[in-house]
Image (cartoon, rainbow, N blue to C red):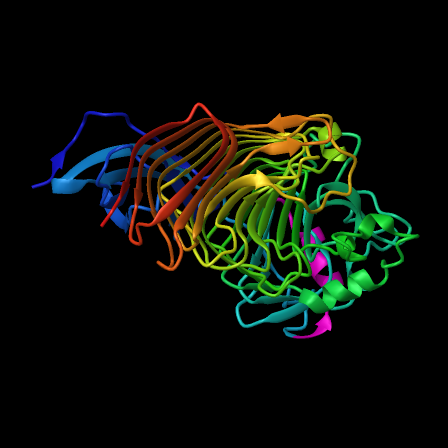
Amino acid sequence: MIERIKAGPIVGVKIAPATLSSSQVTLIWDRPQEQGIQGYQVWQDEKMIERRSPNQTHVTVSSLKPETSYFFKVVVLLEHQLTKIIGTVTVTTMAKEVVFDVTQAPYNADKTGKTVCTEVIQQAINDCPPLGIVYLPKGATVLSGALELKDDLTLQIDGTLNGSLDPLDYLVKAGDPAFKGQANAEGLVRSRYEGWEMYCYRSLINAGYLDPNDRSKMVCHNVRVCGSGVIHGGGTALGEAMKSGYTDLEKYPQYLSDNIPGRRVRGRLLSFVQCQNVHLTGVTIENPSSWTVHLVYCDTVTTNGVSINSRGIDNGDGWDPDSTRNAMIFDTSFDTGDDCIAIKSGKNPEGNEIGIPTENVRIFDLKMLGGHGLAIGSEMSGGVADVQIHDCLIQGTNYGIELKAHNDRGGYIRNFTATHCLIDSFEAQSVDYNSDGTAAKELPVFADISLVDCQITGKQQAITLIGFSDQQNHRKGYLERILLKNLTLSAPTAAAPLRLHFERCAGLKIEHVHLASPAKFSIDLQDVHGLQITDLVEVE
């Protein structure tokens, strides 16, 4: 007999933004406050259809009928056979979509992947009516250069989409009706890279364009990239070919990055610019020429059920929301050549002047098993606020979770919370690279940062919190209001003590932190104000 609990707050269930189609919907909910969560039940029209684990606060329901209403209920399972209804939602699916198969007449894209088929795929996109699907079927391998998506379109890839290795296939051709943004005489498009707007090669998959006269305007709406297949970019070979034409620093000084000429001109694998309601789901995304998924000045983006692999790629970031709001990613795995996720908002001085922050980012149920880990910054001059991370596995990475900024950045990171995560380490600090822009007038501000109910294991340097310092102008920037609560810390080896370093912090609270075996540890405190430590213990 299962006893039902009625007391306590009810946390709602809702449709993940941009995920509703004619046959599928993804539902999400917040993790309840109760202890001892055993999992969740998902009910459809009074029939239990799926059980989810404690870290899976989401479900994707498929095989639904078009234009049909469904009632869903989510129940949390607690200890001692207790349950509680989290919430309910009624969903009405969309009308059945028209499907354009690019391998069939009149497009007849080469299914062997030997011939570049950019033009016929783009023609299918141009021909597709609103809410239609451009389809690459299972078993087909199609080779393409840059593709331009449009409003109310789904690109479904169940086969393999390979990116061409020829940089010329990523330039805008004169008179191309599909591209509505700005391009220079060489065919590069106005984009943003490492925090500055500049002309770059196009990505393999593109949606929207950058409008410097109104960056808040959404120029492309309701775009979905989905499927069970693979998006495979041109990788290092394409990236090097793109760089090779832009290494003359007298002619192209803007493309220098960390003393590597041409680095900033490369295209990404998927770019969404000034887009609203974007859904990226299901596909495996691999081998970009630089960053993998780049979201610039977007509003409302959901990414779920995706695998991202960019190991071995220079600057191979995984998923980068850049001056973007209302972005969500979950049920996704990473193995990257740089940051798995890098949350950005521009670089000094341009990022300060444009001043568009990244806000309301929700990250949960991820596996980051390589690369640098999860980062906010270092390009955050426009500000970053309201980032929530929970139920993530971040192991085998260089930095775990890192909040970072150069002293010159200005800007802010505010209201960051990570809960119920297993991570390599936790860092919030200044960095000394990518500093070739004119300094902001003020030091960066990091404030209201919480790490709660997490395990930190994998690094001897478990936690590093260091504020900012401008010695030339005799200024300090303190990390403000930091909460470390209900943490279990363990080092990978007993050869050296576990280290916690705090410097230039104001309002640091350490509550219920357990130091697991090996129990040796050291805490370094320098210029720390308002320190409160409660229940810092060693576990035998």
Q: Look at the picture and state if 506 lies above or below 321.
A: above
Q: In which quarter of the image is residue 37?
A: top left
Q: Is residue 253 left or right of residue 301?
A: right
At x 72%, y 30%, the residue is: 352
| Viewer-proximal residue among 347 and 424 | 424
Residue 261 shown left or right of residue 464 in the figure: right
Magenta-drawn stretch contains 117: yes
Position in image of residue 481 (x %, y %): 47, 26
Q: In this view, does 151 lie above or below 119?
A: above
Q: Name the one closer to the observer, 383 or 138.
A: 383
* Closer to us: 171 or 445: 445
Q: Is residue 94 left or right of residue 241?
A: left
Residue 53: % across, % down: 29, 49
Residue 196 figure quarter: top right
Q: Where is residue 201 in the image (x, y as percent from the top left)?
A: 78, 54
Q: Give the range drawn in magenta.
A: 113-131
The residue positioned 14% from the left and 33% from the top of the image is 4
Q: Residue at x 92, y 52 (%)?
A: 251
The verdict on residue 341 being magenta is: no
Q: Is residue 303 visible?
A: yes
Q: Can residue 329 be seen in this view?
A: no
The tally of labels here is: 0
Residue 395: image location, x then y, percent: 43, 56
Q: In this view, does 237 lie above or below 470?
A: below
Tell me the quadrant of the picture where the N terminus can be found: top left
Q: Residue 124, relative to residue 435: is it above or below?
A: below
